[in-house]
């Protein structure tokens, strides 16, 4: 397969409600979709970076530059298979979200040409996956607002609810949601908002029967997470700290990580994500599929990943409607049982709808052309 042209589409999707975390609030989803044209046909990828470097160091303008000057040139002008992409991009340090999106587009092009689905390619074993939902911190800091939002998700059929927490917004909102929904599988995510000094405070979450607490402390503080894991009954799950299969294995063996949130973008792509899954399965460590407010392109890929056998906990794999009234692809829908069907068509199985893409696009950049 030869890559002939690479185009980045800058899109802006209005969110159905603001999404607030301990590191910031998003009012729109400003996303880079990557279109790779090869001699076999087109493939699509989605980059999970945001406009600002608040979740991780990556951000959209830097991704465009890294694609154009450092990653895409390594793939142009040669005959390649998708499995060669990680090695070809390997000499470039860092920038996992940029490389992951490029790898996805190349895999998609190859699979669309061969007729195989992305789920089958990854080794998926399920035709449907359970849907979890991530709720932000309400803009008005009101527990009533959170209650209305969570009640709505539970009524829709979501199988698991994740609450974002931060200092000053933790035990009380979690207590209220747990009392209203005694049986709903519930977990919390702090996006690094706490420190080692908060271990006793965080242990107060133990009484709420949570599935896990996600990334409570700074991503580089492995000892802090280990001390917390020793103190807390609730399992400690890592998101931002997990960057590769070797690093995930280190975190697990060190005792800092009892459950892994696998996000392909954060770990450099779906092949790396699958390697983390395989390592975790071998160790008996549960994994689940994280989300980054993906459009239908990234959502299709996540849903396929979440259908691998080791994904034993519901992921942040919500319906498109959780975030968007209009998605770039046909929307992903949750059924009445809180499940979602894994796409079976060639490649990702969905493609941007040209008129919608044109509507949502705020510009595009030709990164390479032969
Ligand atoms: O930490 O899991 C996170 C969204 C953007 C950035 C970071 C995170 C999130 C989520 C997932 O919580 C939201 C979703 O895609 O469902
Ligand atoms: Mg997280």
Image: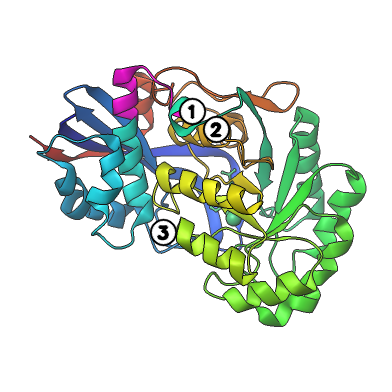
In the picture of the structure, the residue carrying the numbered disc 1 is 119
20, above or below 316, in the image: below
Judged from this view, the residue extending furthest toward the bottom is 197
> Magenta segment, which residues?
108-119
In the drawing, does residue 256 fall left or right of residue 212? left
Q: Earlier in the sequence, mark 1 or mark 3?
A: 3
Find numbered disc 3 in the image and state the secondary structure of the residue it sits on: loop
Quadrant of residue 352 within the rendered picture: top left
Q: Residue at x 84, y 50 (%)?
A: 177
Which mark, by number, is residue 303? 2
Residue 114: in magenta span = yes
Q: Quadrant of ligand 2?
A: bottom right
Judged from this view, the residue extending furthest toward the front is 282
273, above or below 197, in the image: above
Find numbered disc 1 in the image and state the secondary structure of the residue it sits on: helix
Which mark, by number, is residue 209? none
Q: Is there a contact, CB below 8 Å, between mark 2 and mark 1?
A: yes
Q: Residue at x 61, y 78 (%)?
A: 223
Q: Is mark 2 within 8 Å of ligand 1?
A: no
Quadrant of residue 81 within the rendered picture: top left
Residue 66 point in image, percent of width and height: 24, 55
Residue 5 point in image, percent of width and height: 16, 33
In the drawing, does residue 37 fall left or right of residue 341? left
Q: Residue at x 49, y 38 (%)?
A: 14
The CA distance from mark 2 to mark 1 is 8 Å
Residue 300: in magenta span = no
In the drawing, does residue 296 fall left or right of residue 225? left
Of the two numbered discs 1 and 3 in the rendering, the one whose residue sits closer to the viewer: 1
């Amino acid at each position: 397969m030869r890559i002939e042209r690479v185009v980045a589409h800058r899109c802006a999707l209005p969110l159905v409600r603001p999404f607030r975390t301990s590191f910031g609030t998003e009012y729109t989803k400003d996303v880079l979709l990557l279109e790779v044209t090869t001699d076999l046909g087109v493939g699509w990828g989605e980059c999970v970076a945001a406009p600002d470097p608040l979740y991780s160091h990556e951000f959209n303008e830097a991704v465009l530059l890294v694609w154009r000057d450092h990653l895409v040139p390594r793939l142009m002008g040669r005959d390649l298979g998708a499995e060669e992409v990680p090695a070809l991009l390997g000499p470039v340090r860092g920038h996992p979200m940029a490389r992951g999106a490029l790898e996805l587009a190349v895999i998609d092009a190859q699979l669309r040409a061969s007729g195989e689905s992305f789920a089958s390619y990854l080794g998926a074993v399920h035709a449907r996956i359970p849907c979890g939902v991530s709720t932000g911190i309400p803009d008005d800091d009101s527990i009533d607002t959170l209650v209305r939002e969570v009640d709505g998700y539970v009524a829709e059929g979501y199988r698991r609810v994740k609450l974002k927490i931060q200092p000053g917004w933790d035990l009380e909102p979690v207590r209220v949601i747990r009392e209203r929904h005694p049986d709903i599988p519930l977990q919390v995510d702090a996006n690094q908002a706490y420190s080692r000094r908060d271990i006793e405070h965080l242990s107060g979450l133990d009484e709420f029967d949570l599935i896990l607490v996600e990334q409570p402390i700074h991503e580089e503080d492995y000892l802090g997470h280990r001390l917390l894991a020793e103190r807390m009954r609730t399992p400690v799950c890592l998101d931002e700290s997990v960057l590769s299969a070797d690093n995930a294995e280190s975190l697990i063996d060190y005792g800092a990580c009892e459950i892994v949130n696998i996000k392909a973008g954060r770990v450099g792509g779906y092949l790396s994500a699958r390697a983390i899954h395989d390592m975790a399965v071998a160790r008996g460590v549960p994994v689940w599929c994280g989300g980054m407010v993906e459009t239908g392109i990234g959502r299709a890929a996540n849903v396929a990943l979440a259908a691998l056998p080791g994904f034993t906990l519901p992921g942040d794999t919500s319906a498109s409607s959780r975030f968007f009234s209009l998605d770039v692809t046909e929307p992903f829908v949750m059924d009445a049982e809180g499940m979602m069907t894994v796409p079976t068509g060639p490649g990702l199985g969905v493609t941007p709808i040209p008129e919608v893409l044109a509507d949502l696009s705020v510009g595009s950049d030709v990164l390479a052309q032969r």
